[in-house]
Amino acid sequence: MLNSFLAGTITMGFAICALFFLRFWRTTRDHLFLGFALAFFLLGVGQALLGLSIVPEEERSFLYLFRLVAFVIIIVSIWRKNGETGRG
């Protein structure tokens, strides 16, 4: 029961972070914030599915792909942002 509660709080934390970055994207229209919002949303979805399912080893399930895609989105967003500042 404690694991379900902690999975829910982690999911809520990811959702709050996603909404936080989405708010910044709406005011600045900077794609870096949109990438972070999408990545945190995917991390939250993955954590929610993990909390609702019974997976004996997380790293061997398809749920690990949510984290992989989220971190790829973060890396690509940072890479694109650094490319924008270099063009001047």
Image (tube, helix red, strand yellow):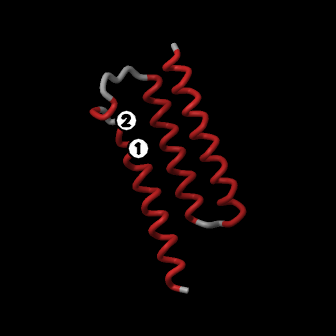
Q: Nearer the viewer, residue 26 or 43?
A: 43
Q: Nearer the viewer, residue 64 or 86?
A: 86
The CA distance from mark 1 to mark 2 is: 8 Å
Q: Are marks 1 and 2 in contact (CB under 8 Å)?
A: yes
Q: Is residue 75 left or right of residue 41?
A: left
Give residue 72's quadrant in the image: bottom left
Give the x, y percent position of residue 18.
Answer: 60, 47
Q: Residue at x 57, y 65 (%)?
A: 31
Amino acid type assigned to the residue bearing label 1 in the image: Arg
Amino acid type assigned to the residue bearing label 2 in the image: Leu
* Disc ID at residue 67: 1
Dividing the image into 4 quarters, which one contains the C terminus? bottom right
Q: Is residue 57 left or right of residue 41?
A: left
Disc 2, SS: loop
Q: Residue at x 50, y 50 (%)?
A: 39
Count of numbered circles in the view: 2
Farthest-out residue, bottom: 88
| Mark 1, other Cα within 10 Å: few <14 / some 14–19 / many ≥20 | some
Give the x, y percent position of residue 6.
Answer: 54, 24
Q: Residue at x 49, y 20 (%)?
A: 3
Q: Is residue 67 left or right of residue 17?
A: left
| Mark 2, other Cα within 10 Å: few <14 / some 14–19 / many ≥20 | some
Task: Indicate whether 11 appears above or below 76.
Answer: above
Farthest-out residue, left: 60
Which residue is the site of mark 2?
Answer: 63
